[in-house]
Image (tube, rainbow, N blue to C red):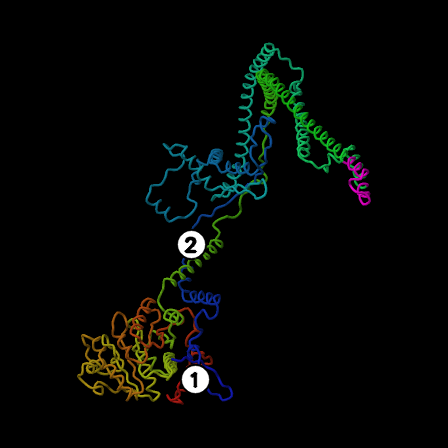
Amino acid sequence: MTDSSLTSDAASGRLVLASANVPANRGAYGPGPAGDTGDLGATLFEYLRILHKRKWLILSILAVIVAIGGVSTLMQTPLYTATVRLQIDRNVAKIVEGGIASSADGGDADFLRTQYELLQSRTMAERVASSLKLGDEADFFKPRGFSILSAMRGLLSPAKPAANSEGIDKRIFENRAAGLVLESRAVKPVAGSRLVDITFTDPAPARSQRVANAFADAFIASNIDKRFEANSYAKTFLDDQSQQLKIRLEASEKALLEFAEKEQIIIVNEKSSIAESNLAAANAALGGLIAERIRNEQIWRQVDNVTAIDLPQFLNNGVIVGLRAQRNTLASEYKDKLQTFKPAYPTMVELSNRMSEIDRQLAAEVKTIKASLKGAYQSSVNQETETKKQIEELRLEVLDLQKRSIQYNTLKREVDTNRSLYNGLLQRFKEVDIAGGVGTNNVFIVDRAITPGSPSSPNLPRALLLSLALGLGAGLAAAYLLERLDDTISTPEEIERTTGLTTLGIIPKVATNTTVEVEGADPRSAVSEAYRSLCTSLQFTTDSGLPKSMLVTSAGPSEGKSVTALAIARHFAALGLKVLLVDADMRNPSMHKKLGLDNGTGLSNYLTGACTPPEAMQTTTIPNLAFMATGPLPPNAADLLGSPRLLSLLTVGLEVFDLIVLDGPPVMGLADAQLLSSSAAASIFVVGAGQVRNGAVRGALKRLELARAPIIGAVLTKYDAKNAGYGYGYGYGYGYGQNAYNYGSTFAGTVDKKARITGTKEKG
């Protein structure tokens, strides 16, 4: 099978079909697969398609949620919000440091967070409710918002007694009032500052102002109360502690004096003792001696086993330097005279003896130097040893002194501690006594609450915007979910993506007030144009052009295969070809009803050998079109279709007819379509838009592939571009007498005109 693409020769005005990998009619049905325009474009196109397809669902959900939001907002009671602003300063002093009765532990963030939590506590709400006597106001307990559940509960349950009713504990209403205050107030810190806003919302504007201001006053009063309580407790505590410390100080001083007399310990000053000073000096001297010993040892070890005199310790010695100079002089003289005299000459012998004597003197001097270095080393070792012994004696002396001073120092520290605590407590007691009469406060009212002039809620525009956003999100989510759950094939792209087959034609869905047969009979209808485009595509599906025999089948029933088979046969018969239309659906035949012919004799009679092909055929009102009905329905349709007589019918029939169209049964779980497809030269797979699922289509095609069926492409029937989400511009927009033409219809009409002029001899 060779695919073709359309090119235009502007010079000759003729249409030329060139080989390509894409069918020539692909462009007749709008854009190709979504992936051809790139991933981003394909994704955007897919989302737009879903929006267009599910627009009524989205709009319905949006309208319902907006209506619910608007109605619920309008039914709510208007609420008024009053705001009071406080400034909360940080306390930096503690009771034991400045006499101020508040704690300052922790950082600013912890302190402010603590204050916010105190503002939101139930104790504060109870204090506000008690100060304003909110439990005595009956209208304070009225519902503040409309709720269907609350209304039903109010109808079913008896009304609660009003405040001040006899037999009702007043504390119950006070607790309920405190709960309502907790629910209606809000604490909002001002970021980056020590300011905090306290808001209260209530149906009564004046009451919201009163409660907000009462919150500020109650918090300030509570803060001052805590300070007075802390001061009073601190004063009592400090007085008791100072009395106890006075007794302890006197006892500790007496014990220290008795111990000093017993041990004969007299402290002149706070400096260390002589033994400790001597020990420290000895330790410092020991370090120098150890360093000197190591240095002398290294020098002695360096010269101990050395025979040469080229070391610095030797070369720096004056005697050795003088002896070496004399020897060098004698050696030079000996060398000079050696040229004149022999070594045995008396003068030469004298020079040699003098050099030997100098060598002996050098050796003796080196030995002396080595001995002196060793002596220095031994002296350093002895000094180090003596110093260590002295340090050990001093250490024992210091330890003895420390043992005798341990208890004394302990008693002395206790005396010092008790005296310091006692003096400090006396000072703090005086400071707290003075601070107790001052009502210090770190909370200030910046702006008092005023009576609100307009309700803060409900906010109808905001509620509608929120409902609009929620409805739009819910609608989009529902549309996307339904689209993903819908696995039926509805578009050409889905056919090609699911089956891998080329879309040969797209048949639009007819209006509800007409039928496919009526639309197909009108040559100017969109259905007729679609089938003409399909038939034009069939002429370019194989190397030899139009297949001689073709089977029209589908995955399930009522997908439009019979109408498609009839349209194909009618079209090519109108072009002058001799066409035989065979109704091969021996399970549920319907073609004879569409043609208005008899079904008494037909294919089943021929396959059983009861008649010849001409006897099973009928003429139709359409020129060049013959029809073979199914005949009586056999109980073993698959056995008849599997007989060689079917292949014989197609072989002999093609000697008389130019085209044989088989209207086959759906694949489903039957073997009929497989047997028919193996006998026909080509098979056309019909898919009803939105009617069959992906799994059924893939299963049907798999069964046909097992039968080695030559499937040339697919046809999408009952296609509704609007419901598929492509709008009016996708599919067929062709109409006679209109100014706008759809590209696919124009191309189909052009190729169809060419086919009418050239007949069937010009192949693709």
In the picture shown, does residue 26 fall above or below 185? Answer: below
| Location of residue 410 (image quadrant) | top right
Q: Is disc 1 placed on a helix, strand or loop?
A: helix
Label 2 sits on residue: 71
Q: Nearer the viewer, residue 200 or 425?
A: 425
Outermost residue on the left side: it is: 610
* Mark number, residue 750: 1
Report the Cα–Cα distance between label 1 and label 2. 59 Å
Q: Position of residue 339 (x, y in %)?
A: 81, 45
Q: Nearer the viewer, residue 743 or 404?
A: 404
In this rendering, the label closer to the viewer, 1 or 2: 1
- Quadrant containing the N terminus is bottom left
In the picture shown, does residue 166 fall above or below 619? Answer: above
Q: Is disc 2 placed on a helix, strand or loop?
A: helix
- Quadrant containing the C terminus is bottom left
Q: Position of residue 495 (x, y in %)?
A: 37, 71
What residue sits 44% from the left and 36% below the top?
135
Tell me, yes or no, whether the highlighted magenta stretch contains residue 144.
no
What range of the chain is rendered magenta? 333-355
Tell me, yes or no, whether the highlighted magenta stretch contains residue 351.
yes
Estimate how packed mark 2 is, as few (under 14), some (14 to 19) or many (20 or more) residues with alpha carbons within 10 Å.
Answer: few
Q: What predominant SS class does the magenta segment belong to?
A: helix
Q: Amino acid at mark 1?
A: Thr
